[in-house]
Amino acid sequence: MKMNLKRFIPGSSLLMLCLVAISMFSLTSCRKDDTYYNYKTTAGAYNGTTYEYLQSQTGLYDSLLLVLGRVTGLADSLKTGSVTLFAANNSSFSLALQNINQARKDSLPKVLPPVTLSTMDSTTLDMFLARYIIPGKLASDSLKGYTDGRMAASIRYGYNMQVQYVPTNAAGFLNGGPKAICFSDPKNSLFVKNWVRVNTMTVDIKTSNGIVHLLPPGHDFGFGYEFIRLINQKP
């Protein structure tokens, strides 16, 4: 979904509109699904590292691999560390870029030039990319005991993300459907209405050194407004 960010600049009056839209999204995106499913949302095991898994998925994670190569150490964590990755695919990065560059185009008083994943500020990329990597192996079943989910510190900067098991229904059986994890950026807020949330589309891909959960194409990499604002602070 393309964000309407006309006349957007850091501190502009559209900040409130953006936050309202984000809040509305957070209230609906991680509810239990009341419909019935019969498709598989787990993908078993991959014989290789988490980084090699991304490389093997031709045409899906090129953008993620590109930004991993622009920051120090995060690619290595997917090669040798024991980590859980919430993987954003090419569409997620395209959506973020579209929103960022629309904001730059509409910025006043000075229009900012467009950016790409290769040219945007690497420090900001590092900050937000790290939020998608959690130390240790976080399987979906390990979250079942947390009714309201739990916090999980990202691999860098001590930033807390929130993870919650989301049961669904299938074939007439309550909570017998495909597994999902609600992955949330709490925005350092105690109030759920301020969180930005996304449900996984596939969970528990086990690699030789970690676990991968796949995020849907409609996820906006960086979780929206804050990422756009910080990227656009740079000319």
Image (tube, rainbow, N blue to C red):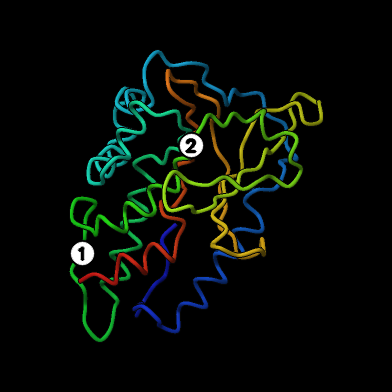
Which numbered dot is residue 135?
Answer: 2
Image spot of residue 216 (x, y percent)? 48, 40
* Residue at the image position 41 percent from the left and 51 percent from the top: 221
Which of 129/159 is in front?
159
The answer to whether the residue labelled 1 contacts the one labelled 2, judged by CB atoms less than 8 Å apart, is no
Dot 2, crowdedness within 10 Å: few (<14), some or many (≥20)?
some
x, y percent for residue 198:
56, 48
Q: Amino acid at mark 2?
A: Pro
Secondary structure of residue under mark 1: loop
Nearer to the camera, 69 or 31 = 69
- Residue furthest bottom in the image: 109
Residue appearing at x 56%, y 23% in the figure? 42
Q: Position of residue 109 (x, y in %)?
A: 25, 86
Q: Which of the labelled discs sits on residue 114, or is there none? A: 1
Q: Disc 1 residue type?
A: Pro
Left or right, 33 with respect to 196, comes to right
Q: Nearer the viewer, mark 1 or mark 2?
A: 2
- Could you tell me which secondary element the residue under label 2 belongs to? strand
Q: Position of residue 82 (x, y in %)?
A: 45, 28
Q: Horizontally, is 110 left or right of 160 in the view?
A: left
Which residue does the image show at 34% across and 80% down from the upper left?
7
Q: What is the quadrant of residue 108 in the picture?
A: bottom left
Query: Which residue: 75% across, 35% down?
Result: 145
> Quarter holding the C terminus?
bottom left
Residue 22, relative to residue 220: is it above or below? below
